[in-house]
Structure formats: C-alpha cells, structure tokens
Image (cartoon, helix red, strand yellow):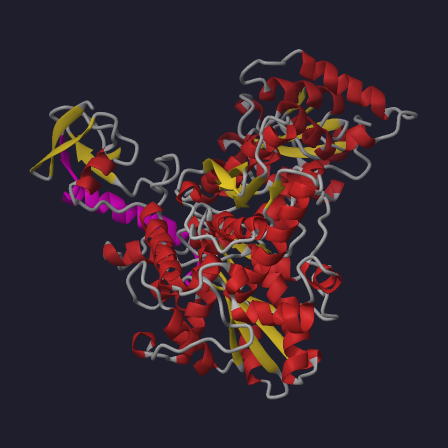
Amino acid sequence: MDMVTLTINGQTVKAKKTSTVLEAARAAGIYIPTLCYHPELSHEGACRLCVVEASGARTLVASCVYPVAEGMIVETNTPKVREARKLVVELLLANHPKDCLSCQKSMDCELQTIAAELGVRKIRFAGGEMKAHTIDAGNPSLVRDQEKCILCGRCIRACSEIQGMDVYSFAGRGFHTIVSTAFEQGLEKVACTYCGQCASVCPTAAIVEKDDTDKAWAALADKTKHVVVQTAPSVRVALGEELGIPVGEIVTGKMVAALRRLGFDKVFDTNFSADLTIMEEGHEFIDRLTNGGVLPMITSCSPGWVNMIELKYPELLPHLSTAKSPQQMFGAVAKTYYAERAGIDAKDIVSVSIMPCTAKKAEAVRPEMNSSGYQDVDIVLTTRELGRMIREFGLDFASLPEEDFDSPLGKSTGASVIFGTTGGVMEAALRTVADVVTGQNLQQIEYKAVRGMETVREATLKIGDSEVKVAVVHTLKAAKAMMERVKKGETEYKFIEVMACPGGCIGGGGQPVPVDADVRRARRDALFTCDEACSLRKSHENPEIIELYSTWLGKPLGEKAHHLLHTKYNQQKRN
Amino acid sequence: MDLENKCCCGGENKEKAQIDEILSKYVGKKGALIPVLQEIQALYNYLPKDILEYVAEKMNIPISQIYGLVTFYSQFHLNPRGRNIIRVCQGTACHVRGGKVILQAIEKQLGIKAGHTTEDLRFTLETIACVGACGLAPVMQINEDTHGRLTTEKLSAILDRYK
C-alpha cells in the first residue's frame, strides 16, 4: 500500500496515499469538526466546517475532500481556521430556528453540539430573511421540517447510496435550495419505504421519527386500559446508548424494569413472537420446498423491505413469505390468545411495541393488520422514543434492577434474539427447519456461514440429505440488485433473507444515533452473546410457543394460524 | 408513467411516440437529460409532470433528480407558460427609474404576481436583471419586443397589442 508522510499540527502522520486530510487527521487522533461529512457516505465538501490550512493551497481547504500529499504541512487549529468555522456555523444558525430547547433533537443535534464546541456566542447575521417551508408529516413514520435543514445532503446520499431509493434531491437554487422529493410531494406520495436511514444520518431535526410518545403516555394514564408492551430483539442491545450506557451493552433486564416503572401492565417480548414467526415461516418454507411452491421464498419481517418490493417489484410478491412480522404476530396474539387467557376484553387492551424501526409505525397501521378484530398493534415507539420516555420519567436507568418478562408472551429462545441482525432470521429458520426435516434434535445450532456484514452473502447448507442454497441481503440497494437477479431467474437460491437497513435491525432507522459500522458490530456481537447465553436456542423448543400451539392455535400453517399470523401483500403505486 | 396506460384511441399515443422519438436520439449518450428536456419543453411549452415521470422511467434516472435539475435551471418550467412572456427589467438603471412601480402596475393589471401565468394563458409575467438597454429605462420585453421609457399610463395600450 502506498503511504505518504505529512505533518499535521506539528505531528508526523503516515497515511494512505488515497486518504483525505480529514481521514489522516482522525486516524492520528486529531479532531476536526464536520457536518456534511459522514464516514459511510460519499464526500460532498459542502459545509466547509472541516476547513484547514494546508501547505501549497492558496485558501483554506475542506479537509474531508482534500487529498493528502507527501510532505504536506497541515494546521487544523489556527485562529484563521477557527474564525472560518465559526463563520460557517453563524451563517447556518442565522437561517435556523432558535427553538433548540424544545426541539426533538435537543442534546442529540450535531449542529447544536458544534456551535457549543466552537463557542459561538453571537450570530452576527441574525435577523435576515429565513427559509420557511411547510412540514411534511403526512405519513405514519417520519416528519420532515425544512426549516431545520442545513443542506448537508446526508439524507440524499444515504437514500441513494445505501438504500438505492433516491427519494430526495436538492431542488431550487441559491438561498431557495431545499432538499426535496420529486415535485415536493409528501413522503407518502413518493417511493419512500419509511426505513428512516435519512433520519438516522440527519445531523439536525430536519428528519425525525414521528413522535408517538404522547399517545403512549395517554394510554398509560388511562386506568380503563390494559397496556401491554413488546420489545424487539435489537432494542435491548441499543437502548443503553440513549441512557448513558456504553455501546454494545445488553440492557434487557433494566429495560424490562424501566417499562414496568413507566406503568405498562404487562411487559412482553417480541422475541416470543419471533419464535412464532420461525414456526410459521419455517413450516411455510418446508411446504414450499416439498410441494412445489414459489421459490426462492423471501423473508417478510422487515417492513421497509416489504414496502420496497411492493413499490418496485410487485411481480415478485409471491416470493414473500406470507408469515407476518414478529411485531404483527405479537399484536394478533395479544388481543386474542392473551386477552382470552387473562379474561380481558380485547377492546380494552392497548398494544405498544418498542421497535428499532420507523417503518414499523407504518406497518402497524396497514388496514389488513387487524385480524384480532381491532388494530393489532396500537402504538409503535422507536428505541429513541423509549429512551426519551425513560429520561422524561426521571428513571436512573443504570441503577435499575434486572427483571424478567411477563408470561405467557415473554419467553424466548436464542434463535429469536438474533432476528435483530442481518442473517439472524435465516439462521433461526435453519435451526428449526433442519430439526423438522430430519426429525431429529440436531446438535448443530450455529450457522456461521450466513453470518457477516457483507451486504450480500450466500451459503449452501446441508439440510437432511439435500443441499439448500440460501442468500442473506441487507440494505435496499443490495436487495434491489438481488431482485433483478431473481427476476431474471439467475439464482438457485431456495431461501433469501432481506433486511432493509444496514446490519439489519441493529442499524434500523429508529435506533440511537450516531451509528456507524463499529456501533453496528458492537450491537450485533451483543445479540450473539444473548443467543449463546440462552439455554434454549431453537424456536420450536420455546415452552410458551409449544403451549400456544397445543392449547389454542393448533398446528403451524393451520386454519387459526393462517387467519391470525399470515398476511397478503399488494402493489403500492407511488413514485 | 401514465402515458403507458393511456388508451390508444386518443391523441396520447401520438404524444408518447413524440417523446419516444426524442428519447431515441439520445439512447446511451451521457449528459442527455438537459437536451431531452429542452426538446420536450419546445414541444409542450413547459414540462408536464407525467411526461417527466415517463422520461425518468425510460432514462432510468430518479424522478427526484430530474425535479432537482428542472428547478435548478431557470430555463425549465413546470407549469404551462403564457402565449406572451413579459419580462420587466429590475436591473440597477431600471430600478432607479421606477422599474418596481412598473412591475407592480402590471401585477395589478393582470392580477398575478411575477413568476406566474394568467389563467387564460395569455401572459406569463417574469422579471429580468438587465436587458442591456439602460438608456431606455425603465424597460420591459414582451416576447421579442423591447418597450422602453415606460410609464404606468402607457402599459394598457402596450399589453393590448398582445393577444
């Protein structure tokens, strides 16, 4: 590898010839503030916050796009540089609302942090014309507020480069430039999957999850309601980040304790219904394999992905597993099976879910998701929203005791917890499918061939006597490329897992920010630790699942299961 | 998009054929979007939404990016244009000679703001930074004609000439 030697702030630094000054500085532990830069997106060089002095350059240069050179001398912290950075921030703030104290992103806002870091005390340009745009809140998942947009373009790049959906573009010119969808339509009118990756990379509150915490507080305060909550697998390894706990820590027990203290009547687990999903989806796969069904079968638990295939590949919908997602299976079972067992009228149950995902909010309000006779899941909160509720309630999260989930929808296996990472649904399904097909309790539990962080992975696995080719895909851009191959009949896969977000749910659009590859890896490793710590690691061994089928549901793919746990998909026409 | 679904008995198929003909000239050419849009605008006088969606699909360019481009360049228009284009100069010389008063008077007379088109599509009203005829300030252009030394009293008679 070609290396160059340069001097940054008097310190000798070695860097790859292809790296930028910013990358070289950060690798050497020298901090340079940035706004439009994002390590996982292409470099734009738009905000000019990362300017530095570099030998040979006439003016200050944007370090995020300026390449290193042999012998280059860089100064990142001269008075001239600091003045320039302050000027940039002052100009941004002059055209930015001043409601930071009551803003949804307060304390999580990169602009706020940088203004504080740089010691911006007055805004010389305040009082001029400011942009005024309407708020886009016509969808269940995301809210866009143009006034808070600083035109860094990270959302545009994330939607295009990670997700391949290209929902956003810069529109207009000069002072009137905005980040816009086609024809400035609401997200519900364009091909948006509600995955929330734009919100995840937005440095300000220009794109945020739709806040449903008020609805949750109201339900908790209503004494006539029985409020149950489910928590998605990946929330337990990310929630801590919202509450001052290091990245990658498992906070399952404290999360359960916190939810009880917030006033939820029953704290259940989406992991339970993830096991249920494996029962249905696993048997559906075996049925398709043995009875000539449509193959490859493709997973359907990621609602961003389901939106994408409904929008872009309606002809491939028969490939989607008809099994509902764990969130929706839980909702259907909570207002039927659980209501019956607890002797509570389903109309008095408020079903809340804690999800890593903004698209789950839209999934819950799909008109067909009412097989209990009511909307199966009433309120969907993201990990970030739960973090805010816990802070608002004043709980000292770190000192809470570890508590267990309630029964009968609270037990789970190691198979279910890995749903939260890319490859996890595939691995969980294989654990059950292999046992069912062979009729044995196989010793093989881990399928390491499907693990990893590459956006497309494939493996050939031996199940019984036959070899089965499978694939695991994450990010919608990779999913699109895979669907093109499936459409052309170029694949021999029998089973494909698709997750919309990078890394799967651990990188979901509703997870704590900031997030990058290291954060996702830490969350993923924590999920595997949870799995290994489980005494039961196959979904069909979950005693509450066995009880559910034997006492109430019948058998997988049976009539009752079909009614409650399976769904249909429809083409969505938006562009 | 909608063009594909329009029935084959009306004029729309001819419309589609015209667009396809324009697109066929640029197949495989890089940087073709601007000339394609220019040709389409020459055909329609503006860029209809459904045509842009059709172009996006055929050229495999995200519609959001096409919208971004169209709104960036002042030469492109997303709404139907009037038969007559009025450009009132707001340059420095015209400004000191009352260009703003002229603009306001026309706005009042036509009942539209600058940047808009009258409902009967007779006039589109725009401003321009300088037409290079400062000696005639205040100035406006209507189509290819330049009208100088304007006063608010002269406006009605001038506008009447354009139907």
Residue at coordinates 69% horizontally, 57% vertically from top-left? A557
Q: Nearer the viewer, residue A504 or A269?
A: A269
Residue A280, how many percent across, how many down?
63, 56
Residue B149: percent from left, percent from top: 62, 28
* Quadrant into which the N terminus of chain A falls: top left
In the picture provided, is A547 more to the left or to the right than B105? left
Q: Is residue A83 magenta?
A: yes
Q: Position of residue A279 (x, y in %)?
A: 59, 58
Image quadrant holding the C terminus of chain A, namely top right
Q: Is residue A62 visible?
A: yes
Q: Residue furthest bottom?
A: A223
Q: Is residue A168 above or below residue A325?
A: above
Q: Is residue A10 left or right of residue B11?
A: left
Task: Give the residues in magenta.
Answer: A73-99
Observer-nearest residue: A487 or A115? A487
Q: Nearer the viewer, residue A298 or A144?
A: A298
Furthest residue toward right: B9
The x and y percentages for residue A107 are 35, 63
Q: Residue at x 72, y 69 (%)?
A: A372
Q: Which residue occupies 15% across, 26% down?
A: A4
